[in-house]
């Protein structure tokens, strides 16, 4: 009895000495020989990269999440400073780079660096391109997945964002069967049939009613060809369905074919991205703010209503008037891509980055900017002021030293005389 207990304690001690348990595989250059076998998601990093350091705990959580779900995917990482030749063969140009290897096919990830987004990417990349489902599974698809296309085969990167399924006619809901549609999208606890333009229809319907927008997926949301209605609020306000008028307005927008074909709702958790768009400070997201953004032209329209007075009906009315004004060409948008606007945006981005650096790392930023400025000031001073002090003097160095000594003695003599005169007066 003592021996198993002793071995258990010894094993526990060894585990603690080895560090925290991890399921992430540390790769070397031999990975190139097995990259075509099975499913891999690999993070290529450099130890000195700050973004890689921030991604480190997220990557560990991703490894445990994939292991807990028993997914047939290996979560791994490779240090590109140690295995440079392997990273060069894989065309790794930046850090961190995340690539999913699907039986030899490389799929690079450009989304958010959050565990939930990475896990969804792994699930969709590992799943079949088109999955066959029955009636029970079809109901699960409609409620468990954000956007699911049924009976659709589409050769593009869409299968990384959405799920595709096929089913028999007998398993299709009666209302969908009566519509006569052969393809439908299931999202927002409902389904919407397809009638024409399969490729453009899938692109337009690939997003749910109100996805969360970020700098990494804003271009994908704009690929629908619609104007993006950005609702700027906090996550607490977004989850409060009783007061969140943005989602309610999006539901009304879905009922209008005229508005739904022109606008796509999305929400922002915080004003950072909106601040970069409008090139100005946005109030803290304790209230609701609306911004309509054209990603192609970088033009935007602001809702100037009081956030406390924005209602479901007023928001739909404003969007309707906005669509009419844009179609008639009577509205003047803000922003754009003109040369003065681009120069202003460049200056604003530089200013924002420097401000953020001083806010997060004040000491390092002071050294980084202070030392070059100090050296430049010294160089400018030495270039300008010596010429003014010397004037037209052309003597040697010894003459300059002699002049300095003479001036010193003259100052001492004058001081001595002043002291003697003062003593005579006081007597």
Image (cartoon, helix red, strand yellow):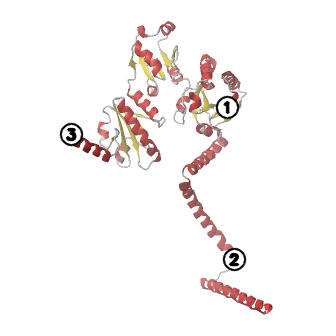
Mark 3 → mark 1, Cα distance in angstroms: 71 Å
Q: Look at the image and tell me whether residue 381 can be seen.
A: yes
Disc 2 crowd rating (10 Å Cα; few below 14, some 14-19, many 20+) is few
Horizontal side, residue 323 vs residue 136: left or right: right
Q: Look at the image and tell me whether residue 303 can be seen.
A: no
- Viewer-side residue, 92 vs 369: 369
Query: Is 378 drawn above or below residue 186 in the view shown?
Result: below
From the image, which quarter does the C terminus lie in?
Answer: bottom right
**Contact, CB < 8 Å: mark 2 with mark 3?**
no
- Viewer-side residue, 240 vs 303: 240
Residue appearing at x 39%, y 33% in the figure: 65
Query: Is 394 drawn above or below residue 248 in the view shown?
Result: below
Residue appearing at x 31%, y 44% in the figure: 29
Dot 2 falls on a residue whose secondary structure is loop
Q: Earlier in the sequence, mark 3 or mark 1?
A: 3
Dot 3 falls on a residue whose secondary structure is helix
Badge number at residue 301: 1
Mark 2 → mark 3, Cα distance in angstroms: 93 Å
Q: Earlier in the sequence, mark 2 or mark 1?
A: 1
Can you name the residue that lies furthest to the front here? 1
Query: Is 391 drawn above or below residue 206 in the view shown?
Result: below
Q: Earlier in the sequence, mark 2 or mark 3?
A: 3
Tell me where residue 112 appears, x and y as whole percent: 49, 35
Disc 3 crowd rating (10 Å Cα; few below 14, some 14-19, many 20+) is few
Badge number at residue 102: none
Horizontal side, residue 53 vs residue 275: left or right: left
Mark 2 highlights which residue?
Answer: 391
Mark 3 highlights which residue?
Answer: 4
């Amino acid at each position: 009895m003592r021996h198993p207990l002793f071995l258990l304690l010894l094993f526990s001690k060894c585990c603690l000495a080895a560090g925290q348990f991890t399921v992430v595989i540390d790769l070397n250059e031999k990975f190139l020989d097995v990259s075509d076998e099975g499913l891999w998601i690999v993070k290529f990093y450099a130890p000195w990269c700050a973004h890689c350091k921030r991604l480190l705990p997220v990557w560990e959580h991703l490894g445990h999440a994939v292991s807990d779900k028993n997914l047939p995917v290996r979560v791994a990482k490779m240090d590109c400073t140690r295995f440079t030749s392997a990273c060069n063969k894989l065309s790794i140009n930046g850090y961190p780079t995340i690539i999913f290897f699907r039986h030899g096919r490389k799929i690079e990830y450009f989304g958010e660096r959050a565990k939930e987004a990475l896990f969804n990417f792994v699930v969709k990349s590992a799943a079949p391109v088109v999955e066959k489902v029955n009636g029970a599974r079809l109901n699960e698809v409609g409620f468990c997945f954000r956007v699911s296309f049924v009976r659709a085969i589409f050769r593009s990167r869409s299968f990384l964002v959405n799920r595709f399924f096929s089913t028999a006619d007998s398993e299709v809901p009666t209302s969908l069967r009566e519509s006569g549609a052969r393809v439908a999208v299931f999202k927002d606890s409902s389904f919407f049939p397809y009638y024409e333009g399969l490729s453009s229809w899938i692109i337009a319907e690939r997003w749910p009613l109100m996805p969360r927008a970020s700098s990494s997926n804003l271009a994908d949301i704009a690929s629908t060809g619609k104007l993006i209605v950005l609702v700027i609020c906090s996550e607490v306000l977004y989850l409060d369905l009783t007061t969140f008028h943005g989602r309610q307005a999006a539901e009304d927008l879905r009922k209008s074919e005229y508005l739904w074909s022109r606008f796509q709702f999305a929400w922002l958790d915080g004003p950072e991205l909106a601040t970069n768009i409008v090139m100005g400070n946005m109030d803290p997201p304790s209230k609701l703010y609306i911004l309509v953004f054209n990603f192609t032209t970088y033009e935007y329209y602001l809702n100037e209503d009081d956030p406390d007075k924005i209602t479901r009906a007023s928001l739909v009315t404003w969007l309707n008037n906005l669509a009419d004004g844009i179609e008639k060409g009577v509205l003047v948008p803000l922003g754009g891509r003109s040369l003065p606007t681009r120069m202003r945006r460049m200056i604003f981005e530089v200013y924002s980055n420097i401000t953020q650096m001083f806010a997060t790392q004040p000491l390092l930023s002071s050294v980084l900017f202070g030392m070059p400025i100090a050296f430049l000031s010294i160089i400018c001073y030495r270039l300008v002021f010596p010429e003014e002090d010397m004037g037209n003097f052309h003597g040697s160095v010894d003459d300059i030293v002699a002049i300095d000594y003479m001036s010193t003695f003259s100052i001492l003599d004058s001081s001595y005389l002043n002291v003697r005169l003062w003593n005579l007066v006081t007597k």
